[in-house]
Image (cartoon, grey):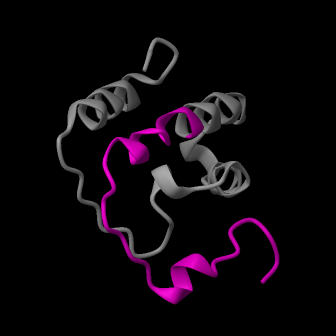
Amino acid sequence: MSTYRLLSWLKHYVELETNAATMRSFESEVIHGLLQTEEYARRLHLVAGPLVKPTDIDMLVAARMRRQPRLTDVAPPFGYEEHTVGGSYGRPA
């Protein structure tokens, strides 16, 4: 995956992720980026406030969607708490 347009800190992370033989992650409040839908990822970036520039949201969401094929390289087991899957980021509960 080309990382030429990603933010510098994200380029490094994506390179590590791409070359990893195993990935382990603990996400207690949000769904892991590789499992997010485009709408979910966009809403997370929208509610990030000053952490994400509005002009970067499309690029960040597109990059996240391009990373998803990494899931089909291997079939990692994963599980989520019910409250994580039912979250309503960026819209009324």
Looking at the image, which is closer to me, 28 or 66? 66
Image location (x, y in percent) of residue 30: 50, 68
Looking at the image, which is closer to me, 19 or 59? 19
Q: Is residue 59 left or right of residue 15?
A: right
Which secondary structure type mostly characterizes the magenta part of the structure? loop
In the picture shown, does residue 13 fall above or below 74? above
Q: Is residue 78 left or right of residue 50?
A: left
Quadrant where the C terminus sits is: bottom right
Q: Single out the residue that lies furthest toward the right.
A: 92
- Residue 72, by quadrant, is top left
Q: Is residue 65 left or right of residue 67?
A: right
In the picture shown, does residue 79 fall above or below 76? below
Whether the magenta-drawn stretch holds residue 73 is answered as yes
Image location (x, y in percent) of residue 55: 71, 28
- Residue 27, by quadrant, is bottom left
Residue at image x 24%, y 52%? 23
Residue at image x 80%, y 70%? 91
- Magenta region: 65-93
In the picture shown, does residue 78 fall above or below 45? below
Image location (x, y in percent) of residue 32: 45, 59
Residue at image x 52%, y 79%? 84
Whether the magenta-drawn stretch holds residue 82 is answered as yes
